[in-house]
Amino acid sequence: MTANDRPAATRVTLWAPDGLVLVLPDDAPAGLSTGGAGTPTQPLVEILAVGHGHASANTRNTATSIGARLRVLGHDVERADGCAIVQVRQGDPVTGLLVTSHLRVRDGGSSLQSWTSVRNDGSAPVVLQAVSSLMIGRPVGTTPVAGTLSLEGHGEWVGENRWAWTPLSGQDGLVTLDLPAHQHQDARGARSVVGAGSWSSGRRNPCGVVASEHGRSLAWQIEHNGAWRAELGVRLDANGDELLVLGLLGPTDDDHAWTHILGVGESFESVPVSLAAASGWQEALGEMTRHRRASRRNPRRPGVVFNDYMNTLMGDPTTDKLLPLVDAAARAGAEYFCIDAGWYDDGGDWWDSVGLWEPSTSRFPDGGLRRVVDAIRAAGMVPGLWLEPEVVGVRSPLADLLPDEAFLQRHGTRIAEHGRYLLDLRHRDVIKHLDEVVDRLIEDFGVGYFKLDYNVTPGAGTDLGADSPGDGLLQQNRAHLDWIDGVLARHPDLVIENCASGAMRADYALLSRLDLQSTSDQQNPLLYPPIAAGALVAIAPEQAANWAYPQPEMSDEQIVFTLCTGLAGRLYLSGRLDDMTAEQSALVARGVELAKRWTPRLVDSVPFWPLGLPTWSAPLVAAGLRSADESLVVVWWRGPEATAIDLDLPAGSVDTAYGPPDDGWDVTRDGDGPVHLRIPAGPQARVLRVRHAGLV
């Protein structure tokens, strides 16, 4: 990182060559430049506030009056934890706001994390409506808007991580408007990607890529477990040329009913966001993968987890059902065994009675739950339990024991969703209860793994003790993170899975803290491949836990198909392993053995997609993980007839790393050219291995 002074501005190179430059002018707001010359048109920070609004009318969060008035007061560069930390201080002379941008630039890479803090040093309160975490003009250089694409993801329960490229100048995008002929005004609209409520990825993924037709690409992500907004808009520079602007924000007034009254002397901090740049979109996602790893608080070796739920016990665990599964999972090579939903239920309908988290006596009549967890430990595995800590069933005794203020509310009424109330984690009684539950289960049963689920969402938020519903939700989101931090401070060796109806809350506010992310609740193995391949856009491979649920009634090809899905990221095992033949068990164990053998490479690998990102119904799907000396490539064929395909894979020799004993695939390669695959009638899948060196 270098800085140099010029008559009109200080420039700080964040990464080079052809990288990102922070420009600090004397008479204009600070900004980011991808070219390094001139004063950026787009300020680094935009702030919307009641009574100030926009300096130039639009429905975006750019050209704000406060953003345009900011002037640089100074900057500092410090070093910590493998990062250069740049802090830029700016002031608004009208409101008295002191605005500080925090940019954490990763050593040896081309990525950064950014957030904005605002302190009211004025004489009157300021009602905030939006505070950007980062704004950047020309995110992919001087490429015109017509030559730029946006990669955006859609989420849905059991249909997660569906990615699509959109030309920004298309009919539904940022069409050419001849802005110079219209009094030199900016465009007023934007292409926006918005997440709402507390399912941060429930509708749209909080990450994406902006790519130019020449290959230059910028990956982005918003690291927040609640509401957020990303926007792409067009502005005019001083020469009348159009420039693309990428804006990344947490909750806003327009999108999320968020306002926050910033009193005199008070401070506010926006949510963190990150950028990663490279010469191509897959390379940018590889750089973002490295950035995600660098952001993790306590990364550890990703062990193989067996969970009894998916297509197996489905929330109906008992001693008689679990003990054979425990033995079978251990023989297969699992290292953790998680007892999923239902372990606390005596009545048979646990959905709206959850909350106390006391082990069932009817399900575990002889020796109680302790007998099962002791068996898990005796089999050499770490015992785990499912929890949904943020909710209380409407029939739970806890619903009457806790005061109304312990629940999220709107207009004085508890928010209820699908037979549950949602706990307000700002309330001390709630935190006391949740801490007691976690500590008790760890102390009494030696639990070393929790699957934390979250199956309902409160909508816009809570207006209890908040300036707006969105403000209450943001407070709740941050209280949730504080609670997790407290749990991990007391139990640093505890492994925690992040789950929310599958992957409805997959974000790096949580994943920087937690170990793995369930990628879906999808029970149909034929529908899982595009989810598993797409998950690698948003989640580091060693955290992307894909279900593999082999069953005794499956053929060898079907068992291999579902194991291949698990091996596309972090293997997450389920299935009636206890009813399998010796040959079927051996086939499963071979998949687990490959996952464990490849673990040292998994934690350093970056994803790639030999066929591009798949559509939902694509018959052929491929996703790869590339390490320094070896790559694994999972290929799924979902068509009914035979097929042939050529794949461009990294240089090196190719073989089949995982398949059935009677392998009908023909895999050949001439030198380092394309890999030729001849695949029999499907559905079928294989894990291919490429042995190479020096490609990461």
Image (cartoon, rainbow, N blue to C red):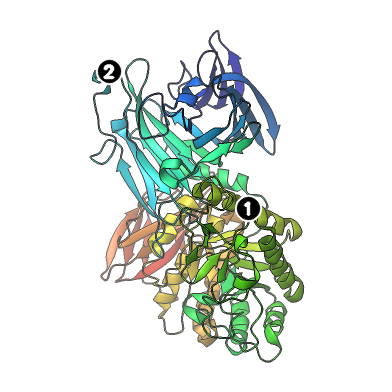
Q: Position of residue 173 (x, y in %)?
A: 28, 39
Is any part of residue 384 visible from this angle? yes
Please identify the residue farthest to the bottom as the structure is shown.
Answer: 366
Say what secondary structure mark 1 lies in.
helix
| Nearer the observer, 664 or 408 | 408
Rendering quarter of residue 243: top left
* Label total for image: 2
Q: Position of residue 289 (x, y in %)?
A: 53, 47
Could you tell me which residue is drawn at 42 percent across and 70 percent down? Answer: 561
Instruction: Check the image and report above or below for 378 versus 243.
Output: below
Could you tell me which residue is drawn at 36 percent across and 35 percent down? Answer: 59
Q: Which mark is residue 367?
A: none
- Badge 1 density bin: few <14, some 14–19, many ≥20, Cα 10 Å: some
- Badge 2 density bin: few <14, some 14–19, many ≥20, Cα 10 Å: few
| Nearer the observer, 131 or 512 | 131
CB of mark 2 within 8 Å of CB of mark 1?
A: no
| Nearer the observer, 687 or 690 | 687
Rendering quarter of residue 182: top left
Instruction: Give the residue number, with chain letter if any, for mark 1.
Output: 479
Instruction: Check the image and report above or below for 254 versus 331.
Output: above
Instruction: Give the residue number, with chain letter if any, for mark 2.
Output: 183
- Amino acid under disc 1: Ala
Please identify the residue farthest to the front as the structure is shown.
Answer: 412
Comes first in the chain, label 2 or label 1 = 2
- Amino acid under disc 2: Gln
